[in-house]
Amino acid sequence: MISHRARSGVIATGLALLLSGTAQAQVSDPHLSIEPRTRAEAARIATVTEPATDFTAPAPFEANQGGAGTVRRRADPQAFSMPQKNLTFQQDARFNIGNGLFERIWVTPPASTIASDGLGPLFNTRACQNCHVKDGRGHPPAGPDDDAGSLVVRLGIPTDAGPADIKAMRDYLSTRGDPVYGHQFSDLSVPGIPSEGRVRVRWRDADSFDLPGGERVTLRRPVWSLQDLGYGPMDPAARISPRVAPQMIGLGLVEAIPASDIIALSDPRDADGDGISGRANIVWSPEYDQPMLGRFGVRASTPTLRQQAADAFHSDIGIASPLHPQPWGDCTPGQTACRAAPDGLSAEQDGLELAGDSLDLVTFYSRNLAVPARADVGDARVLRGKQAFHQTGCISCHRPSFVTHRLTDRPEQSFQLIWPYSDFLVHDMGPGLANQLPAGQASGAEWRTAPLWGIGMTAQVSGHDTYLHDGRARSLTEAILWHDGEARAARDGFVDLSADDRAALIAFLESL
């Protein structure tokens, strides 16, 4: 357990980073049991993770983008649902139990099925797997008959006051929920409780790009609306932020990257003048009662996978767990019938709807979903695309590789060379992607750099080719063309590529 003195130092340092934006400040990883690196190891890691300069052959171990846990690249929709290859027999069993909980269909309380009791009263989906289908990416509604089952809409009213001291940091929220509809819009509900309404999207043409070789690409922009509101109008100041479910692979490896390695990449004042000013999103962890590096979510607003799982159970399904013991989920005080509805709290679940050991099993499952091996790493066209990816500046944010902590209790994620292609910082992506709803220290225009491993298998696993946080991009080319703000120079570099080099860059992404 961390000492009071050490904990105070961590808090003070984290607060200093939060308030000053100092890139080199350190934030600890209290969720990990760590063996410190030696100076010799740090030097080796710096050499191994240096971006490539030779594009005539793949880098050593580049095909194993998930380290020793990498699994073979399958050609079916189960490609993202495999356990890491380096799990023990006992861990495989634990993974499978966690998978069962991840797929569990929750039922309306009161129910005789205690292990599945507690749905809602308001919810977006009845099972984790229904949103993260095949552990892959979600999609926006494809039409009026398609629901928003793999998409959620976050709500909030931006606030102006930022944290000035450690107490303020504990209590700081960049948004407060809508007074009636809370922090997340729920389009489903249990019988007898009105749902909050329906999510609808219309598409209109946005910018067009004429690319070398005669290709013309017209982007589409979503126009979101919340219709048939079940509890009256929203606050006029409320803002919405739709986002599709992300793919699930490699999450435990991301959690095992040293916070200091990610924070060292931040440059909030663009001191080096390269136009990239990525920032670490330091958030307050209610689980550990201290500042921590946000790693997960489209705005890097969640520090650990356990909290991520508990937050999803709470907001998406309406399930009470140790981190969110309220049985009514996101129901607000004004939704009186929702708050008074029957719940699934039970002694068998430690007075909750999902006991702590069950939450840990779901977290273990999420932590150990394997990254598939790279495809065609030595193919000449893929290598040419890799070179274009580097030379256009994409790696300024999509950093190729890291080495994880030495972990004393998680050997499957310990000291692994991995290739996520992300810096896990938040970047201003320009007005086209902004939605005016901040998250922690991330503004409405800032988004976490999405890891790219597995992106070439999106259609195979998820059955669609939609990308970015809200699924607006219908191809990898469109996703790149939406980049603006800090990423404008890299986007313009892509636009200026010849047709052959552009196709090679896309082939490189499809190999990940």
Image: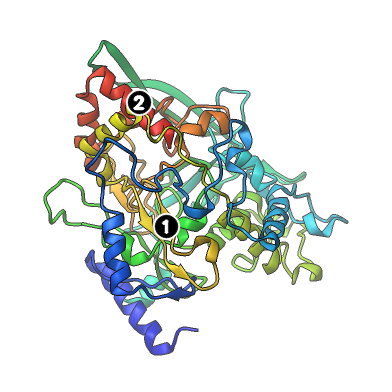
- Quarter occupied by residue 115: bottom right
- Image check: 406 left or right of 279? right
Residue drawn where x is 53% and y is 28% of the image: 459
Give how far across and how far down residue 222 sits, in percent: 42, 28
Numbered circles on residues, count:
2
Q: Which residue is mark 1?
A: 295
Q: Amino acid at mark 2?
A: Thr
Amino acid found under the numbered disc labelled 1: Arg
Crowding near the residue tagged with mark 2, few <14, some 14–19, many ≥20 C-alpha atoms within 10 Å: some
Q: Secondary structure at mark 2?
A: helix
Residue 369 x %, y %: 58, 50
Looking at the image, is 321 positioned above or below residue 476? below
Residue at 32% across, 25% down: 504
- When asked about the image quadrant of residue 124, the answer is top right
- Give coordinates of residue 428: x percent, y percent: 27, 45
Image coords of residue 321 (percent x, y): 65, 64
Judging by the rendered image, the residue that carries numbered circle 2 is 477
**Quarter the C terminus occupies:** top left
